[in-house]
Amino acid sequence: AHKDAYELAKVLHRDLSVGNVVIYKGVGILIDWDLAKLITIQGPRQKNRTGTWQFMSGYLVSHLHAVHRVEDDLESSLYVLLWTGLKYSDT
C-alpha cells in the first residue's frame, strides 16, 4: 500500500504505526490518512511533528524541524514489523 501511494499517487502517509495497519483476509491495509501529504508540496504541511512517536524515524525524533521524507516512512514500517514480531513471538 505504501509503495503504491508513494509511486502512483505521490503521497506520503507520515503516520505509520501498528494502529494504522489493518489485516483483512490476509491482506494488509494502510488506514488513517489524515496526516498524509502530497510529495509535490514543498515544506511542512503543519507546524507540529506528525506521526506516532514510538514509530517515528530516528531522524525525525532528533531533528525538530526536519521535513518528512519517504525514508522516514520506510523506517517507521520497519519499527511496525519489529514491534509486531516481538509482541506476538513466543518467549
Image (cartoon, rainbow, N blue to C red):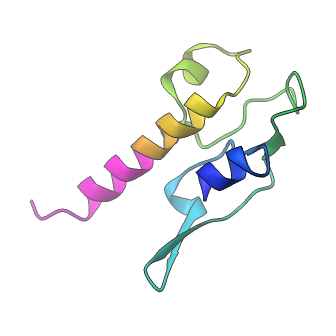
Q: Residue at x 61, y 52 (%)?
A: 2
Q: Is residue 60 left or right of residue 58?
A: right
Q: Position of residue 66 (x, y in %)?
A: 70, 16
For image coordinates 43% across by 50% down, the residue present is 80
- Magenta stretch: includes residue 47: no
Up-down relation of residue 20 to residue 45 (above or below)? below
Q: Nearer the viewer, residue 77 or 51?
A: 77
Which one is nearer the viewer's eye here, 30 or 6?
A: 6
Residue lying farthest to the front in this orientation? 8
- Residue 44: x, y in percent? 85, 26
Please provide percent x and percent y for residue 41: 90, 30
Tally the numbered discs: 0
Q: Is residue 62 left or right of residue 9?
A: left
**Span colored in magenta:** 79-91
Q: Residue at x 60, y 50 (%)?
A: 3
**Main secondary structure along the magenta-highlighted residues:** helix
User: Could you say which quadrant of the image residue 60 lies in?
Assistant: top right
- The one nearer the camera, 14 or 61, is 14
